[in-house]
Amino acid sequence: MSARRCLLFVPGSRPERFAKAAASGADMVCIDLEDAVALPDKATARTAAIAYVEDAPTSCEWVLRINSPRTADGLRDLLALLDASALPAFLMIPKCADAGDTRIVREVLGARCPELIALIESAEGLDNAAQTAAAERVTMVMFGGADYMAELGGAMSEQSLLYARSRLAAAAARAGIAAMDVPSLEIRDQETVAAETRHVAALGFSSKAAIHPDQVATVQRALSPSEYEIERARRVLDAFRASPHAAIQVDGKLIDRPIVLAAERTLRRAGLSIP
């Protein structure tokens, strides 16, 4: 998961920013055809985004956030993708209420359907998160916290988002896929961005989106294991495999199978092989 720590959004109506977004160092760049594009600009943004993705630089993985497949603009996005010479690595499907949204995309694109990121941003979507996460071609779910809290009539905070984040992380874990968190609305205060990222990482999220290039490095550092964490993970695995017992002690702490699995995840997040 270390290669997919941070996804940077860029508006589909600003093609002059596409290359700059790729140069940000983000692991993934998402060209947004939905919320970031005004209605009169949908057609030109669609054309520009698909043309760029067809020959995009390979410094990052490319994502295209289409409009909801239950809308006319979403269907126009899918039909345009059918005619494209190349598709992005991922399509992000907004406002996923249930697995039916992903099924529409798969049925229209057929064998050309890339991997899917299901954006869950409503109470209904959260209720059906486990079903959506398990759907064919879905390899990541993303939490749309702003839309979710707008529906609830609440305010975004660590406490108010805790239930939804925890439930989405659990749904992703059950399906064996990754969970991505909503972008932080804080742009200048990078310590706030880092603290928010560390919080969601502790809940089980492996990725966090960004809305500004300045957030990218902060998010990636917060989601990357420290040297101490890597070294301890190696010691845990070495000690566990050298012992005939199912539970041992390392540094005075009990080590059993769940801790071993966590150590393996740490090495995978760092892009390292598991001994």
Image (spheres, rainbow, N blue to C red):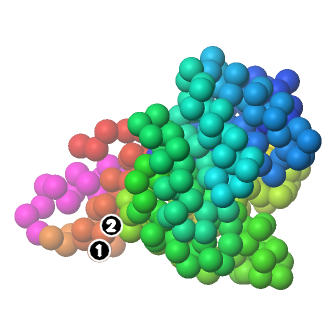
Q: Which residue is mark 1?
A: 254
Q: Is residue 130 left or right of residue 126?
A: left
**Residue at 64% of width from left, 53% of height from top?**
69
**Residue at 76% of width from left, 42% of height from top?**
33
Image-quadrant location for residue 236? bottom left
Residue 226 or 273: which is nearer the viewer? 273
**Where residue 141 sits in the image (x, y, percent)?**
55, 58
The reply to whether dot 2 and dot 1 touch (C-beta < 8 Å) is: yes
Q: Is residue 243 left or right of residue 109?
A: left
Q: Magenta stretch: dominant SS?
A: helix
Q: Which residue is mark 2?
A: 259
| Residue range (magenta) | 227-245
- Disc 1 residue type (three-letter): Leu
Q: Is residue 255 left or right of residue 165?
A: left
Mark 1: which secondary structure?
strand
Q: Is residue 155 above or below residue 183?
A: below
**Where residue 36 sits in the image (x, y, percent)?**
83, 47
Quadrant holding the C terminus: top left
Q: Nearer the viewer, mark 2 or mark 1?
A: 2
Image-quadrant location for residue 174? bottom left
Mark 2: which secondary structure?
helix
**Residue at 31% of width from left, 39% of height from top?**
273
State yes or no: residue 233 in magenta: yes
- Disc 2 residue type (three-letter): Ile
Residue 176 or 271: which is nearer the viewer? 176
Residue situated furthest left in the rendering? 244
Pointer 1 local density, CA inside 10 Å: few below 14, some 14–19, many at least 20: few
Residue 132 or 270: which is nearer the viewer? 132
